[in-house]
Image (tube, helix red, strand yellow):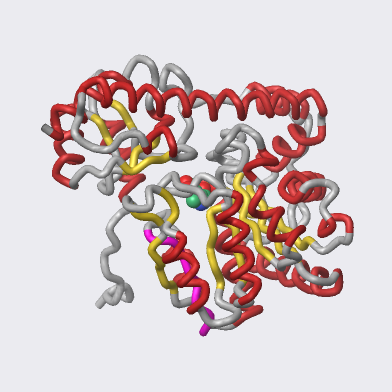
Amino acid sequence: PSFFGGVTYTPPDAIFELTKTYNADPDIRKVNLGQGTYKDENGNPWILPAVQAAKEKIKEANHEYLPILGLGSFRTLATELVFGKASSAVQERRVASCQALSGTGALHVAGKMLYKALGRKTTVYITKPSWSNHRQVFESVGFPVQEFVYSSDSTNGVDMSSFLKTLKDAAPKSILVLHASAHNPTGWDPTPEQWKAIGVVVKERQLFPLFDAAYLGMTSGDYDKDAFAIRYFVEELSLEVGVCLSFAKSMGLYGERVGLCAFVSQTSTATEAVESALAQLIRVEISNPPAFGARIVAAVLADEEIRAEWARNLVTMSSRIAEMRWQLYEGLNQLGTPGDWKRITEQKGMFCILGLTPDQVLHLQKEHHIYMAESSRVSIAGLNWSNVKYVADCIDTTIR
Ligand code: PLP
């Protein structure tokens, strides 16, 4: 008998599987609205000019190991980027950090760290719906995961009463996973006022906020603006927080797997302890992180000119997405397609849920070669001037 007899088959990840099917589709009309990766006007991956310039700068780098916690300059610059250089947490050395394998790796390390700190009985709250990986990342660490209703059609945005009720009912020390900006998959973010209300209850109830920050800078095109919630919690509410930062989307470094896991503590002594624990977690898991992506990010952030170029690149990406939101809305509006489409333009970030049935989603794929998640979540970044009208027409005929 096999040693593996007890291993049951695990179905493949739906979104990666969708990309595979899309790639294999020979039809020239095909459109991929599945995976949330930015595409340029011609539907191609975009190497950011800022990243191109940074790569020129680092081409002489050697191939030695990085330190266990990652590239020092990367950690410093990325920490200042998220919290702001003037942040009291940064100034008072109250941020523990380590380089991580992009956003996903950062979430995993954060989960491990919080497991050490808070124990296995701690509930992790995630939004319903949320990014498809959240539940399994935190369950794999050993935490019970609970969902709470995040948004609804009737509120046309964040369902604050459900949100606040969940926080009020949660046991102290529970972990709350928050999407720092560009909520995936709904595209609804709390307004600054709503963030403040959430923060106050988080503090009152002594919950631990863990920010998943995969879309900072990509959301509005302004990094500082997108980091509002994190900074408000840290600076105004003096909360301890965790941040899982990804550079996949904001620098287009999907395959480089570069991210940061950061924890703000009340004291520099606690910070030192947290950082030492992070080092052990990294040592056990990967010994030390990959160098290439971290060098690119550090080179972008350290050079004034390249950094300014990156700021422009963020605007290019976020405004192209915003434009495509308008074009899709306009297309459906002009066709008089039944449904409420205005929200496409009101939502933020790459994603939006169209509200189609699984049958309609399948019909769009089979008949029109338009690919999207089964939930009818679409990645707006897959739209461009050449395909947006086609997509609107096909959605229209599918719904009628
Ligand atoms: N968190 C959210 C909400 C995401 O949408 C993603 C990617 O799609 C990630 C985290 C992590 O991405 P990565 O591991 O590629 O940085």
Query: In the image, is 286 to the left or to the right of 149?
Result: right
**From the viewer's perspective, is residue 49 above or below residue 376?**
above
**Does 174 lie within the magenta span?**
no
Query: In the image, is 293 to the left or to the right of 76?
Result: left
Q: Position of residue 351 (x, y in %)?
A: 41, 40
Q: Would you identify the image quadrant in which residue 162 lies?
A: bottom left
Q: Residue at x 49, y 23 (%)?
A: 320
Image quarter where the C terminus lies is top left
Q: Position of residue 386 (x, y in %)?
A: 34, 15
Query: In the image, is 228 to the left or to the right of 67?
Result: left
Q: Position of residue 70 (x, y in %)?
A: 74, 53
Q: Residue at x 73, y 41 (%)?
A: 63
Q: Would you identify the image quadrant in which residue 62 lies?
A: top right
Q: Judge by depth and name the residue closer to the eye, 240 or 99.
A: 240
Q: Residue furthest right?
A: 92
Q: Judge by depth and name the residue closer to the eye, 396 or 120.
A: 396
**From the viewer's perspective, is residue 14 above or below residue 237?**
above
The region drawn magenta spans 121-128
**From the viewer's perspective, is residue 270 above or below residue 47?**
below
